[in-house]
């Protein structure tokens, strides 16, 4: 198989196939200036790339509106605009 055939089989771009070969992830040989791959090597490369996703425990979602409304606010306005006004007035 050549680079284009491997790309068509895997759905990757040809440059991705060449990069995997340069990295040593995919075994190939160069014949007459073109990369060639054996079907078994391509299938082994695909198998090595597979992984089983582990399901992580889900965190409980927090309602942001209720969480921020329950926070204590400082007196005299707590917005950035109010603090900037106070700082200007103090100068």
Image (cartoon, rainbow, N blue to C red):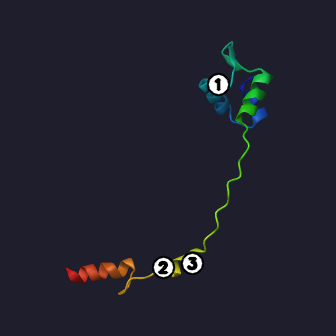
Q: Which mark is residue 21?
A: 1
Is 40 located above or below residue 73 in the figure? above
Q: Pointers 3 and 2 in contact (CB under 8 A)? A: no
Asked if residue 43 lies left or right of residue 63, the reply is right
- Give the camera-side residue of 2 and 40: 40
Q: Looking at the image, which residue is at 68% across and 35% down? A: 13
Q: Earlier in the sequence, mark 1 or mark 3?
A: 1
| The N terminus: image quadrant | top right
Q: CA distance from mark 3 to mark 2?
A: 10 Å
Please tell me in which quadrant of the rendered image residue 9 appears: top right
- Give the camera-side residue of 42 and 62: 62
Is 66 located above or below residue 61 in the figure? below
Q: Secondary structure at mark 1?
A: helix
Q: Which mark is residue 36?
A: none
Q: Position of residue 84 (x, y in %)?
A: 31, 78
Total labels drawn: 3
Residue identifier under label 2: 71
Q: Looking at the image, which residue is at 68% across and 25% down? A: 26
Asked if residue 1 lies left or right of residue 68, the reply is right
Q: Secondary structure at mark 2?
A: loop
Q: Earlier in the sequence, mark 3 or mark 2?
A: 3
- Give the camera-side residue of 54 and 4: 54
Q: Which mark is residue 65?
A: 3
């Amino acid at each position: 198989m050549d680079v284009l055939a491997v790309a068509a089989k895997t759905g990757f771009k040809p440059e991705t196939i060449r990069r995997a070969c340069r990295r040593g992830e995919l075994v190939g040989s160069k014949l007459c200036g073109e990369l060639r791959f054996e079907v078994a090597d391509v299938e082994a490369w695909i198998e090595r790339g597979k992984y089983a996703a582990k399901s992580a425990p889900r965190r409980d979602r927090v309602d942001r509106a209720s969480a921020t409304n329950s926070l204590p606010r400082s007196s005299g306005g707590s917005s950035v605009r109010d603090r900037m006004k106070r700082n200007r007035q103090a100068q």
